[in-house]
C-alpha cells in the first residue's frame, strides 16, 4: 500500500507512463474516441496529473481479483474519474475507467 492509502504509488505510475507501459480497455478507448479525445494522449495526461491534480477516492477489487485504485483528477474544466491497477509481472498500468467524473460509460 502506498503512503497515500492507495495500492500503487504515484511515482510508480508516472514511471510506467513515461516508459509507454500503459494499457486501456476497449471500453475506455472507445469512450475517449467517441468524445473527441486522443486516447493515448488523454490517458497519459490524466495518469501523470495524479500527484498535482488527483485525489484518491478509494480502492476496489476488480472482477479479476486484483486491487485497483480510483481517483478523481482535475484537468482544465473537467473532473476525470480514473480506475487503474498495475500488473506487477508485466509492469503495465491497466486503465479500466477514464472518463468525466459522473459520466455513464
Image (cartoon, helix red, strand yellow):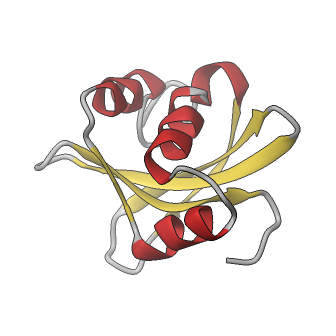
Can residue 55 be seen? yes
Instruction: Reply above or below: 4 against 57.
Output: above
Screen quadrant of the C terminus: bottom right
- Vertical relation: 35 (above or below) 26: above
**Relative vertical location of residue 72 with respect to residue 19 in this rendering, above or below:** below
Residue at x 35% of width, y 32% of height: 17
Q: Residue furthest right?
A: 77
Q: Is residue 68 left or right of residue 75?
A: left
**What residue appears at the point 34 percent right and 64 percent down from the top-left corner?**
66
Question: From what the image shows, is residue 44 above or below residue 95?
Answer: above
- Name the residue nearer the viewer: 68 or 14: 14
Residue 6 visible in this rendered orientation of the protein? no
Q: Nearer the viewer, residue 56 or 30?
A: 30
Indicate the quadrant where residue 91 lies. top left
Q: Which percent across, then down, holds residue 65?
A: 33, 73
Q: Total marks drawn?
A: 0
Q: Position of residue 63 (x, y in %)?
A: 40, 80
- Residue 13 or residue 37, whichever sits in front: 37
Residue 64: name its quadrant.
bottom left
Q: Quadrant of the N terminus?
A: top left
**Horizontal and vertical percent for residue 11?**
40, 21
Residue at the extreme front of the image, as rendered: 36
Q: Is residue 50 left or right of residue 72?
A: left
> Where is residue 89 drawn, in percent x and y?
11, 49
Point 82% across, 65% down: residue? 102
Amino acid at each position: 500500500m502506498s503512503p497515500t492509502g492507495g495500492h500503487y504509488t504515484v511515482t510508480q505510475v508516472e514511471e510506467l507512463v513515461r516508459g509507454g507501459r500503459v494499457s486501456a480497455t476497449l471500453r475506455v478507448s472507445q469512450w475517449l474516441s467517441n468524445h473527441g479525445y486522443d486516447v493515448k494522449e488523454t490517458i497519459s495526461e490524466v495518469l501523470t496529473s495524479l500527484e498535482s491534480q488527483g485525489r484518491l477516492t478509494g480502492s476496489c477489487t476488480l472482477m479479476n481479483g486484483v486491487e485497483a485504485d480510483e481517483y478523481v483528477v482535475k484537468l482544465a474544466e473537467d473532473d476525470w474519474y480514473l480506475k487503474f491497477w498495475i500488473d506487477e509481472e508485466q509492469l503495465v498500468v491497466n486503465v479500466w475507467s477514464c472518463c468525466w467524473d459522473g459520466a455513464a460509460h
